[in-house]
């Protein structure tokens, strides 16, 4: 699913068994690719068993004006080189949701937030049982420009592995 200049609300749905094989920078998002000026709200849905050769096996969200909100949903058993479950460099809210059993051959098995500006994991959301070959099995947060992460917030979070720069 590719979103470009689009607003999407996905409700009571399943996005599963998709694959991307592109090695082009900023490509991937086998389950969902939210690009530039797009936004996605995922409600009571499952992003399951998607595989990307590059970024974001389940969800890839790139661009300063892109955003993703995940409510009461699961991101499960996805894989990618970076950001097995989710790769983002745009605002991401995970609320009452589970990001579990995802894997990355690089960093961020569950979530990889690069040049992270706004990441919120709220209300008993779980980031658990994810793996990464390098760093951040559950969550890897990076600031490329060295200014630090602007906002990472969480409440009642289950998170066994975190790496932040």
Image (cartoon, grey):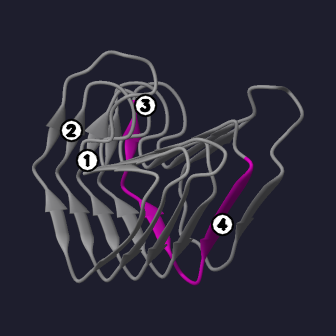
The answer to whether marks 2 and 1 mark residues whose Cβ atoms lie closer than 8 Å is yes
Residue, disc 1: 78
Q: Mark 3 or 4 closer to N-term? A: 3
Q: Mark 2 or 3 closer to N-term? A: 2
Q: What residue is shown at x 23% (from left), y 52% (from top)?
A: 77
Q: Main secondary structure of the magenta part?
A: strand
Determine the image quadrant of residue 15: bottom left
Kindly give the residue lying farthest to the right in the view shown.
147
Determine the image quadrant of residue 159: bottom right
The answer to whether marks 2 and 3 mark residues whose Cβ atoms lie closer than 8 Å is no
Would you call the spot at circle 3 few (<14 residues within 10 Å), some (14-19), or many (20 or more)? many
Q: Is residue 99 above or below residue 90?
A: below
> Viewed as shown, does residue 125 lie left or right of 103?
right
Residue, disc 4: 120
| Label number found at residue 82 | 3
Q: CA distance from mark 2 to mark 3?
A: 11 Å
Residue 5, given in percent of the width and then of the height, sits at 46, 52
> Viewed as shown, does residue 53 lie left or right of 151?
left
Residue 55, given in percent of the width and then of the height, sits at 39, 32
Secondary structure under the numbered disc 1 in the rendered image: loop
Q: Which residues are magenta?
A: 117-132
């Amino acid at each position: 699913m590719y979103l470009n200049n689009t607003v999407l609300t996905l409700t009571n749905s399943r996005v599963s068994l998709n694959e991307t094989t592109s090695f082009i920078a900023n490509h991937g998002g086998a389950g969902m690719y939210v690009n530039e000026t797009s936004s996605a709200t995922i409600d009571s849905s499952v992003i399951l068993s998607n595989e990307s050769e590059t970024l974001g096996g389940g969800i890839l969200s790139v661009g300063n004006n892109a955003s993703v909100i995940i409510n009461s949903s699961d991101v499960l058993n996805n894989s990618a080189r970076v950001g097995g479950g989710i790769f983002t460099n745009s605002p991401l809210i995970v609320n009452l949701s589970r990001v579990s059993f995802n894997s990355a051959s690089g960093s961020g098995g569950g979530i990889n937030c690069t040049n992270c500006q706004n990441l919120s994991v709220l209300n008993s959301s779980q980031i658990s049982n994810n793996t990464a070959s390098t760093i951040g099995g559950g969550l890897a947060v990076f600031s490329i420009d060295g200014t630090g992460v602007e906002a990472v917030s969480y409440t009642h979070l289950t998170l066994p592995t975190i790496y932040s720069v």
